Amino acid sequence: MNYCIAVDIGGTKIALGLFDQTGRLHGQVRTFPVPFDDYGVADPQGLLQLMRPLLEEVRHNNLPLCGLGLSICGNIDPNTGEAVLVPNLHWRNLPFGQMANEAFGLSTFAATDVRQALLAEHMWGAARGLDYFAWCTIGTGYGGYLFLDGKPYDGYHKFAGPFGHATFDEINGYPCGCGRRGCVETYVAGPAIARAGQAAVEAGCSPMMADLAAGEPLTTHVVFQAYRAGDAEATRIIDQAVRLICISLSSVNNLLDLQMIVLGGGVVKGLPELVDLIDDKIRAYLLSEEAKRDLRIVQESFSNASLFGSAAHAFIQCGLPIIS
Ligand SMILES: [Zn+2]
C-alpha cells in the first residue's frame, strides 16, 4: 500500500490529509487559514510551511509516500502544476507545483479544485464506472468540470468547464467575479440567493426572513430556514434559482449527452433538497427522451471532494492503481 499527502488550497483556508490508495484518510484533516501578505496575495512559502509538519511526520514513520496531490481554487495546468490564474489568491502564472516539488523533494501533482472533486467522484464516489458526467458546485460560485470519454476533459488551454460564466444577461445583469457582467453564477450562487433574500426583506415582503435575520445582513442560511418553514418569498427565491440552474445544466447536458451530474458546494450542503428539486425540474429542459429517462442528478459523496480527488490524482500520476 502506498500513501500520498493531499492538500486543498481554497480562497480562505488550506486543508491537508494523508491518504492511501483505497481513498482512506489516515488521521484527521488539518485546516489552517491561508496566509496573505499586505497586498492580498496568498504567500506561497507560508503555505508550504503549513504542509511541512505532516510531511515530516509521514517520513518519520517511514510510510511509503508516492507524492503530493494539490487542489487549488483557480485555473491550474494539470500537466505542469502551474497556477495560471487564481483570482482568490491573487496568483498569475505561479509555478506552485514546482515550488512544492523543490521544497519537499517530493513529486507534486496539482490541478484545479473542481477537476480534483470530479476525479474523487469518479474514483471513489457517485460516478464510479461512468464515462460521461459533470461535477457542478453551487456555493460562493457556480461552475464545474467535465468528465468525457472516460477522462477529465481539460480543453486546449486547460480552461474547459466553467459553465457558470455563461452569460445570461450582460445588459441588466450584476457584475461577476470573472470581470464580466450577468453570468449565470450571479443569479444562482450563494451570494445571489442571499442578495434576493435581502431585497425581499428591504421591500417588506418577508417578515419571517426579517425576523430570522434579526437586523444582520441576510445569509443563504436564513433563506433556507424560511424556505423550510414555507415562507412564500423564500420559496420564490429558491424556485427561481432552481429554474435557472436547470436551464444552465440542461444546456450542458444537451450539448454533451451525460450520464450524471453530481451537485456539491455550500448551497447544496445547506439545502440538500435542491438535488431532488433540480432532478425533477431539469427534465422539462432536456432535449431527448433518452436524457429525460437516463440522466441522474445526485449529491456529492464527500465533505471535501477536492481533497480526496487530489489524492486520487497523485496516485494516478504516479502510475499506482486506485483501489475502489
Ligand atoms: Zn462570470
Image (cartoon, rainbow, N blue to C red):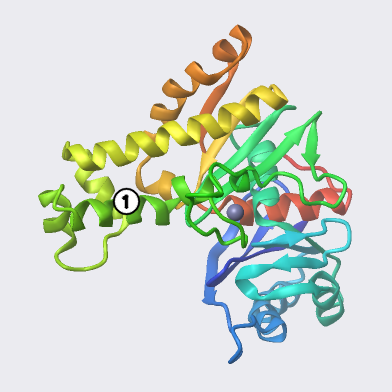
Q: How far across and how far down the image is residue 11, in percent? A: 56, 69
Residue occupying image coordinates x 15% and y 48%:
206
Relative to 185, is 318 on the left or the right?
A: right
Total numbered labels: 1
Relative to 138, is 81 on the left or the right?
A: right
Seen as rendered, the residue at the extreme bottom is: 38
Relative to 206, is 249 on the left or the right?
A: right
Whether residue 301 is visible here, answered yes or no, is: no
Q: Which residue is mark 1?
A: 196
Residue 133, compared with residue 312, is above or below; it is above
Asked if disc 1 is less than 8 Å from ligand 1, the answer is no
- Residue 221 or 247: which is nearer the viewer? 247
- Residue 279 or 205: which is nearer the viewer? 205
Estimate how packed mark 1 is, as few (under 14), some (14 to 19) or many (20 or more) residues with alpha carbons within 10 Å: many
Q: How far across and how far down the image is residue 299, in percent? A: 49, 36
Residue occupying image coordinates x 18% and y 53%:
203
Helix, strand or loop at mark 1: helix
Residue occupying image coordinates x 36% and y 50%:
193
- Residue 67 or 137: which is nearer the viewer? 137
Q: How far across and how far down the image is residue 90, in percent? A: 66, 76
* Ligand 1 picture quarter: bottom right
Residue occupying image coordinates x 40% and y 39%:
241
Residue 273, compared with residue 271, is above or below; it is above
Seen as rendered, the residue at the extreme top is: 289
Residue 175, compared with residue 296, is above or below; it is below
Name which quarter of the figure residue 255 lies in: top right
Whether residue 120 is visible here, answered yes or no, is: yes
The C terminus, quarter of image = top right
- Residue 77 or 105: which is nearer the viewer? 77
Residue type of the residue flagged with mark 1 = Ala
Q: How far across and how far down the image is residue 72, in percent? A: 68, 63
